[in-house]
């Protein structure tokens, strides 16, 4: 499919709107505000992963997993790639699994679009305006449905064994059995935003990422629609905090994977008139907590009212019904599994809202296939209950199970949602979000749901296996895939973090708000919904965008279809490295580099930069005049008391000096902008020539620089000086060398070898060794 993310070096210094996060709330905000004619920048911490690139083998899935582990109460340990698709936060009371990538958790969820029981919005946790605004909320649900295209599994589709087994369980459990609306495409074609989608193949691998392009994630609709209307989308940019400076917001972020942290570099930033926080519940709350620590006045309720949406997992293991509840994975063929979730046993019609729940069947990604047999046998022996068909099995089968099919053919997976008490808390430890909710798994609703799952498993004559961590051994801990709250709406700052429109309160009490700061994701929701939350998150994000546009006099054009402005092919094979240089400068000696350097050293007037340089390998090596791109920061007290952001940075490798055939230059040219918007232009060169004495290190590590006031080199000189690479920094720089956009490790190794040979060869030729 057409890629929509831009390289980070295309980032402009200022936008009308910066949207943080690309799940439902972020994608909707970017789409709608771009349709309102605003300049929109979207920042996503994960990568752009398109269909065909999602993991379908165990080793790929492991490589796409990142885990945050607790170390006591005040520290954490992060394992795995920070851009891994599956992002698991483990804590003492409850664990959270979310998605990381362009599209957020929509990439790995089951895409069930279900409205909650209407009684949910009558609960006291919501500001009264939400219930009073029921007609608009209904319109916003409709707008989300128009874009996400939910539909039930077709009646004339291939029979799905797991759906039929769910119907059997419903007969014993009671409640309504019905096929759910799911965001899945069952007919191939170009959709309403110009994306070509294929029909669902029934592979069952929805929650490890759809490689077919049949799943209607926001990568298939809202995000390309945002790009169609001019939004600029950037990946691998992890926002850390926000700052209010004058009449604009400063969004501080860290490029992920570029190696800047190895140089203790400052954060990058972009400014905006409006900021929409939609980084997912944990992401949004983390940004708010870090911003409050840095001085931004916010409600004391940030992090409070966290809920896992009453999520609970369970299994009917080794039943006497065919189920086929494990995806195809790397086999890419097999019995029809179907979309991850297709049906439900609906027990929400209870006299008391909080007693209701809904049981949905599911599928397990095929990438886990080789792991499942031993894992389920062990779990069944430790915690399994029931399974009255054991007398039909041989002794071998009773002890060891009858191979892989006990799981892949005869195990049903259940996801249940209900109403927990919503009293969880998020807090910061070492700058990262931690979770605290003592005794959450011991609430009565989870015992009632477990009893219902026992009945569902018994109807299939399967052994009921609860989530292994929901046991006495693990203190009845839970796992949720639907984290909500933490920046919940409320009537004022004493009761909530935002108002009913997602506007963020500017203090600990009262109703004063921060101008232009919004929350538009699951963090906004003040209580459990009791159903899959994606559609309600989407409706509330639509509602927030409606009000934001209305208050600013913007007009959102909802016309469909839309079409791509242009096609972006797969990015070319490139090299990337991060470099730091430091030295001395002067603002009153603008003619001679050496004199300016000496004056700066005498006065201790310093300048240093940390730049990430990315270049297309072929053009960088074969076309010296074709620049690589640069992004980063420059720090110099003579220019600003805060780091300056690099924009429009160009780097040229080995350009022939027209005045000296024995000399080549490396050029650094870039615009700088202070946090207050003041522009500068930086120009520097390294001179590589055949010095007597063959001083290769000095030539390649010395940069002569001039900084001009204004946007280009025609502006007056502001300072001059000389920068150097220290040997310890050079060693760190070598660890940041990467090949991007390769087809695998072999191509990466060949590309790095080629770059090294050409680089060394140019030096060889220049210095006339032979």
Image (cartoon, helix red, strand yellow):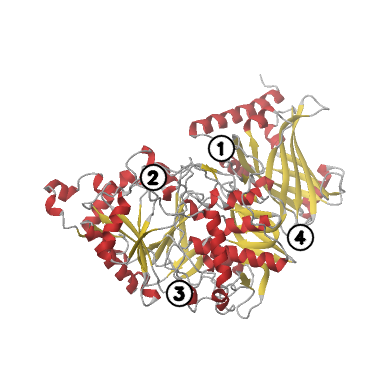
| Rendered location of residue 704, percent (x, y) | 77, 41
Q: Is residue 89 left or right of residue 515?
A: left
- Measured Cα–Cα span from mark 2 to mark 1: 30 Å
Label 3 environment density (alpha carbons within 10 Å; few <14, some 14–19, many ≥20): few
- The quadrant holding residue 698 is top right
Q: Earlier in the sequence, mark 3 or mark 2?
A: 3
Q: Earlier in the sequence, mark 4 or mark 3?
A: 3
Q: Which residue is mark 4?
A: 676
* Along the viewing direction, whichever of 518 and 96 lies nearer the viewer: 518
Residue occupying image coordinates x 69% and y 35%:
700
> Camera-side residue: 241 or 464?
464
Which residue is farthest front?
A: 156
Examine the rendering and report whether any part of residue 290 can be seen.
no
- 199 vs 720, left or right, is left
In whole angstroms, how far apart are the C-alphas of marks 4 and 3? Answer: 48 Å
Q: Which residue is mark 3?
A: 119
Q: Could you tell me which quadrant the N terminus lies in?
A: top right
Crowd tier of the residue under label 1, counting other residues whose Cα lies within 10 Å: few below 14, some 14–19, many 20 or above: some
Q: Which mark is residue 202?
A: 2
């Amino acid at each position: 499919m057409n890629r929509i993310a831009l390289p980070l070096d295309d980032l402009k210094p200022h936008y009308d709107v910066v949207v943080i996060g690309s799940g439902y709330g972020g994608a909707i905000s970017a789409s709608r505000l771009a349709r309102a004619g605003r300049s929109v920048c979207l920042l996503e911490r994960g990568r752009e992963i398109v269909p065909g690139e999602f993991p379908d083998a165990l080793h790929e899935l492991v490589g796409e997993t990142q885990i945050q582990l607790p170390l006591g109460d005040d520290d954490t340990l992060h394992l795995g790639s920070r851009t891994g698709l599956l992002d698991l936060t483990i804590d003492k009371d409850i664990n959270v699994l979310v998605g990381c990538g362009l599209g957020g958790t929509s990439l790995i969820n089951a895409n069930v679009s279900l409205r909650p029981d209407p009684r949910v919005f009558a609960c006291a946790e919501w500001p009264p305006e939400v219930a009073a605004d029921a007609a608009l909320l209904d319109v916003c649900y409709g707008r989300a449905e128009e874009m996400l295209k939910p539909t039930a599994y077709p009646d004339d589709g291939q029979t799905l064994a797991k759906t039929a087994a769910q119907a059997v369980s419903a007969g014993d459990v009671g409640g309504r059995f019905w096929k759910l609306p799911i965001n899945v495409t069952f007919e191939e074609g170009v959709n309403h935003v110009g994306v070509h989608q294929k029909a669902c193949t029934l592979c069952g691998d929805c929650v490890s990422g759809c490689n077919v392009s049949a799943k209607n994630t926001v990568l298939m609709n809202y995000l390309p629609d945002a790009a169609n209307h001019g939004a600029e989308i950037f990946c691998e940019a992890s926002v850390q905090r926000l700052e209010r400076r004058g009449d604009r917001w400063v969004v501080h972020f860290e490029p992920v994977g570029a190696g800047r942290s190895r140089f203790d570099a400052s954060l990058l930033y972009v400014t905006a008139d409006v900021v929409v926080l939609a980084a997912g519940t944990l992401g949004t709350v983390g940004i708010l907590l870090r911003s409050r620590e840095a001085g931004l006045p916010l409600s004391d309720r940030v992090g409070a009212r966290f809920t896992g949406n009453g999520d609970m997992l369970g299994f009917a293991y080794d039943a006497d019904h065919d189920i086929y509840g494990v995806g195809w994975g790397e086999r890419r063929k097999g019995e029809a599994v179907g979309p991850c979730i297709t049906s439900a046993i609906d027990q929400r019609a209870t006299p008391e809202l909080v007693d209701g729940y809904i049981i949905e069947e599911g599928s397990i990604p095929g990438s886990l296939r080789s792991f499942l047999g031993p894992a389920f046998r062990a779990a069944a022996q430790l915690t399994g209950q029931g399974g009255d068909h054991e007398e039909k099995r041989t002794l071998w089968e009773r002890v060891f199970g009858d191979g892989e099919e006990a799981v892949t053919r005869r195990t049903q997976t259940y996801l249940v949602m209900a109403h927990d008490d919503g009293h969880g808390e998020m807090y910061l430890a070492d700058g990262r979000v931690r979770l605290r909710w003592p005794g959450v798994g011991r609430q009565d609703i989870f015992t009632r749901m477990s009893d219902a799952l026992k009945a569902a498993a018994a109807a299939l004559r399967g052994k009921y296996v609860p989530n292994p961590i929901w046991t006495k051994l693990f203190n009845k801990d839970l796992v949720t895939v639907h984290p909500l709250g933490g920046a919940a709406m409320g009537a004022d700052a004493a009761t909530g973090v935002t108002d009913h429109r997602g506007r963020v309160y500017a203090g600990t009490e009262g109703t004063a708000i921060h101008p232009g700061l919004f929350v538009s994701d699951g963090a906004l929701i003040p209580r459990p919904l009791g159903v899959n939350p994606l559609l309600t998150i989407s409706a509330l994000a639509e509602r927030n965008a409606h009000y934001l546009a209305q208050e600013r006099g913007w007009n959102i054009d909802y016309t469909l279809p839309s079409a791509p402005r242009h096609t972006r092919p797969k990015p070319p094979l490139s090299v990337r490295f991060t470099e730091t240089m430091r030295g001395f400068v002067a603002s009153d000696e603008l003619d001679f580099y050496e004199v300016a350097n000496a004056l700066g050293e005498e006065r201790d007037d310093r300048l240093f930069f940390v730049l990430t340089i990315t270049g297309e390998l072929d053009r960088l090596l074969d076309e010296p005049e074709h620049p690589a791109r640069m992004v980063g920061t420059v720090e110099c007290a003579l220019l600003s008391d805060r780091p300056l952001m690099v924009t429009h940075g160009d780097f040229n490798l080995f350009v022939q000096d027209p005045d000296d055939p024995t000399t080549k230059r490396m050029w650094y040219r870039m615009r700088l902008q202070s946090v207050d918007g003041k522009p500068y232009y930086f120009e520097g060169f390294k001179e590589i020539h055949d010095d007597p004495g063959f001083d290769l290190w000095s030539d390649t590590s010395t940069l002569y620089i001039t900084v001009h006031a204004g946007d280009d080199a025609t502006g007056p000189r502001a300072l001059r000086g000389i920068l150097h690479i220290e040997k310890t920094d050079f060693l760190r720089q070598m660890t940041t060398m990467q090949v991007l956009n390769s087809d695998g490790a072999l191509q990466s190794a060949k590309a790095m070898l080629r770059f090294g040979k050409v680089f060394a060869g140019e030096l060889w030729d220049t210095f006339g060794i032979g």
